[in-house]
Amino acid sequence: MPYSYHEHISDIGIRAEAPDLKSAFDEGVSAMLNVMFDLTTIDENEAHEIRAEAPEIETLFVEVLNEVLSIQGLRELAFKRVETTAIEETYEGFRYSGRAFGEKFDRTRHEARTEVKGATYSGLRYNGGAGGTHVLECILDV
């Protein structure tokens, strides 16, 4: 499994590890979504654009997670996964673009697990490319 969980007093820590940065972002979002839903019950009937900007890779990770939560909540969706299109360095930091795939939330079909209120800056870490691996970590407020 390319993502894992670690113990935290009242919240959930996620850790995503992948051979490249885009895949690490994808795995990090999958880790968060898997806390919220049984992903096997969600179909990919809709795609929604995800965009975020931040001064550093670590903060970009939190911004992306929170953007996914925001779109999912506002539109009453259940996302199954994201696909990162690009992570670009800009004059002021970094810009993310990608797409989230899922469908309208249906209580009769989707197993809701734990509500994630937001991704936090607590426990935020990025280890970029050491040994050919990109690792992103943060704490989810549940």
Image (cartoon, rainbow, N blue to C red):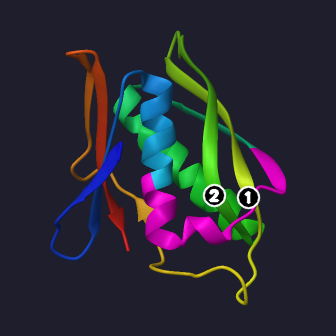
Residue that appears at 59% across and 82% down: 111
Other residues around mark 1 within 10 Å, as few (<14) / some (14–19) / many (≥20): many
Label 1's element?
strand
Q: Is residue 67 above or below residue 73?
A: above
Give the spatial CA distance, label 1 vs label 2.
5 Å
Mark 2: which secondary structure? strand
Task: Compare marks 1 and 2 and give the one earlier in the sequence.
Answer: 2
Q: Which mark is residue 102?
A: 1
The location of residue 130, given as percent across then percent down, is 20, 17
Query: What is the crowding at mark 2: few (fewer than 14 residues within 10 Å), some, or many (at least 20)?
Result: many
Residue 26 point in image, percent of width and height: 51, 39
**Tag 2 residue:** 80
Three-letter amino acid code at the position of disc 2: Lys
As drawn, which residue projects farthest toward the right? 45
**Image spot of residue 47 (x, y percent):** 80, 48
Instruction: Look at the numbered discs 1 and 2 and tell me whether their residues touch, using CB distance below 8 Å.
Output: yes
Bounds of the magenta segment: 31-48
Q: Is residue 104 visible?
A: yes
Q: Amino acid at mark 1?
A: Gly
